[in-house]
Image (spheres, rainbow, N blue to C red):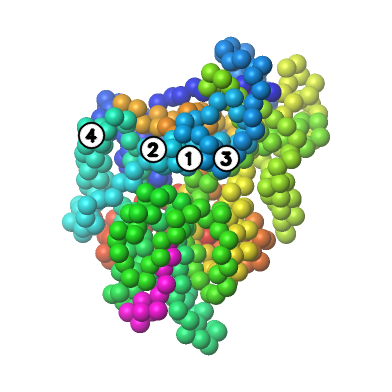
Amino acid sequence: MFVLPTRAHAASSGLAHACRAGRRQLATGRPKTTKKPEPAEKTEPAARPFTGYFDAVRDIMQMPATTADTSIPARRVTAEYCSTHFTKAPRNVSMLTRDFISDSLYNPAYGYFSKQALIFSPARAYDFGGFRDSADMLATVGRQYAAMERELDDVRSIPRQLWHTPTELLRPWYGRSVARHIVRQHKEDCAMRGSDDPLVIYEMGGGTGTLMTDILGYLRDCEPAILAQTQYNVIEISSKLARSQRSRQLANVRVINKSMLEWNELVDRPCFFVAMEVIDNFAHDVVRYDYDTGAPMQAVVRVYDDGEMEELYEPVADELICDYLDARAKLPGAPYRSPALPSAAYRRMRRRLPLAPNLTRREFIPTQAFQLCRVLRDWFPRHRLVLSDFYRLPDTVPDAVDAPVVQTRFDGSMVACDTYLVQPGWFDIFFPTNFELLQRIYDAVCGSQSHVCSQRDFATRNAELQHTRTRSGENPMLDFYENNKFLLS
């Protein structure tokens, strides 16, 4: 049993770094600092023997004393239970890690997305040809971002957080590139079937509705015959964002305000399922492996009477965790081995050291993404997938596999934390996606043959690059969001 102190540290994240690093809040109003230039290529330092052992001993010695009353029994709850029974973060409860993260992000009363998060959306689409180069564009975005943050601080009693996506920053051309991919695939499918089926699109997590508007705008401008038969559906968990999407009053659009993971309506016709920068906020579970047997143990978050949180471990019993681990173990091809699980010889040697921990480091496993794959298999059996998200992120929680970024905004700056055990509702928690593993899981669950490509490759094939080129020849559609990938089926 380990107590994880919630130590936060300031994270330096300039605008250029944020745009190239992925969806991160942009920090403004901080003192300037001098930074040493980074080398062109970073190389990982050579691993030192038993580094993890010494780190674990150091953390144990530095753990703070608790003031919680551990004698008070904890009630086991889920995120769904919390959403209907609590209007503020509960205490004297315990829940799986994915329930804790999901409740922290989506609880309608105190969750991050209902309380703090706002999407940065420029008032007008950028004239890329009017910028000298990418740096000129980033400077303009930074000024707008800073102005929006100041406005929010002036009118709100709590510091709201802004975040941006390629859909908003590169509109309408990013959405049009997605539309061009969908239209080309739709035409190929119709020709193969010898039919003239309508174009049916389901978008999960439509945000402010920008992607929907840009896709339909492309169809209006370039494919009016297809637009006449298009049926566009948005599945949106947020009531606030669902209202924003409906307010656009677009023809052939249906907005469904519910969680995609609760979907129970059969769509037995060809369709495209679109998920852009959504699954990074899908909750994960945490497992650690027994050093003696290699058996996985599932994490449970215990919240005490004083609000202090502790991570406890128990044998894996949750059905979804069991199903995911079983599906991963049975993947065709080369067997998957968790990076968190050292070799048997190393484990035997480490057991002989004093104070050696009995569990490996954490592994965050994408149980909700796995759940999405099963929903697509069961309820959208004839779908094609268009999914994009981040495969690499800076400032992730240390010493863990596939760990998230946990950050909030304080006094005009972004603060990243080294634990996910933080006050629910005040922190964004988002994960990088292991696309190669997700592809194998998705293909195995859905019986598909998908492929992964980079943001640059997708844009090269589908984007109207002449519209996003700056005067210097640099192209933000190709150069920004280099840590994005696509999963296409």
Gap between marks 1 and 3 measured at Cα: 10 Å
Kindly identify which numbered label has been placed on residue 107. Answer: 1
* Horizontal and vertical percent position of residue 399: 59, 31
Q: Residue 343, can we see it?
A: no
Q: Of helix, strand and loop, which one carries label 3?
A: helix
Residue kind at label 4, given as amino acid type? Val
Residue kind at label 2, given as amino acid type? Lys
Gap between marks 3 and 2 measured at Cα: 19 Å
Q: Residue 205, can we see it?
A: yes
Q: What residue does disc 4 label?
A: 155
Q: Of helix, strand and loop, which one carries label 2?
A: helix
Gap between marks 4 and 2 measured at Cα: 15 Å
Residue furthest front as drawn = 85
Kindly identify which numbered label has been placed on residue 68. Answer: none
**Which circle, 3 or 2, is nearer the viewer?**
3
Gap between marks 4 and 3 measured at Cα: 33 Å
Residue kind at label 3, given as amino acid type? Tyr
Q: What residue does disc 3 label?
A: 81
